Amino acid sequence: GIYSYELIHTFGCKKLIRVGSCGAMQENIDLYDVIIAQGASTDSNYVQQYQLPGHFAPIASYQLLEKAVETARDKGVRHHVGNVLSSDIFYNADTTASERWMRMGILGGEMESAALYMNAIYAGVEALGVFTVSDHLIHETSTTPEERERAFTDMIEIALSLV
């Protein structure tokens, strides 16, 4: 959350697009597919700073989401739109946690979208997370570091269409 907070409050950014890799958490998602994060569930306590009297569901800017989906369709990019898990824990000792999130329809796991969306919503700016699947939690497959460096262009092109 620190980077998005500083981009908003120090640099005055009004539109934040997070790109990166994620781990697929559904059978029908393949390596190199793009996930566009409509919402971001989390196991973090980041939301507690807002002292809300309940649970908050951080979601992306609809305008950015709609444009990203349109771009992905126009370019013929295999993509999925839905909820991701922003986790504080990369290697979880609770080996069944992922299965419970998968049952809730989580498309992929990453570490930043929930805080990004909360910071953006609270500040009244737009945000969206766009990810390329680098690993598959169910199939236990992954891309190489070289592939991650060179083959994630669809995600970048989608993100660039938003600015």
Image (cartoon, rainbow, N blue to C red):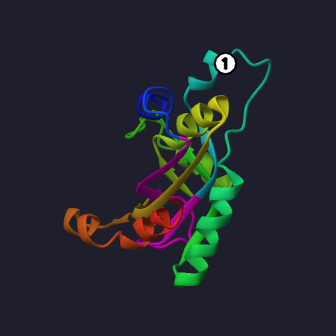
State the residue lying farthest toward the front: 12
Q: Which residue is mark 1?
A: 50
In depth, the one of 65 and 113 nearer the eye is: 65
Q: Residue at x 73, y 32 (%)?
A: 56
Q: Which quarter of the figure has residue 118?
A: top right
Give the x, y percent position of residue 109: 49, 50
Instruction: Give the residues in magenta.
Output: 14-36
**Is 160 within the magenta?**
no
**Is 29 within the magenta?**
yes
In depth, the one of 159 and 110 nearer the eye is: 159
Q: Residue at x 70, y 14 (%)?
A: 51
In depth, the one of 68 and 27 nearer the eye is: 68
Give the x, y percent position of residue 82: 66, 58
Q: Which quarter of the figure has residue 27?
A: bottom right
Q: Residue at x 55, y 29 (%)?
A: 44
Q: Is residue 111 visible?
A: yes
The kind of residue on which mark 1 rests is Tyr
Q: Is residue 82 visible?
A: no
Give the x, y percent position of residue 76: 54, 85
10 Å crowding of disc 1: few (<14), some (14-19), many (20+):
few
Give the x, y percent position of residue 87: 49, 38
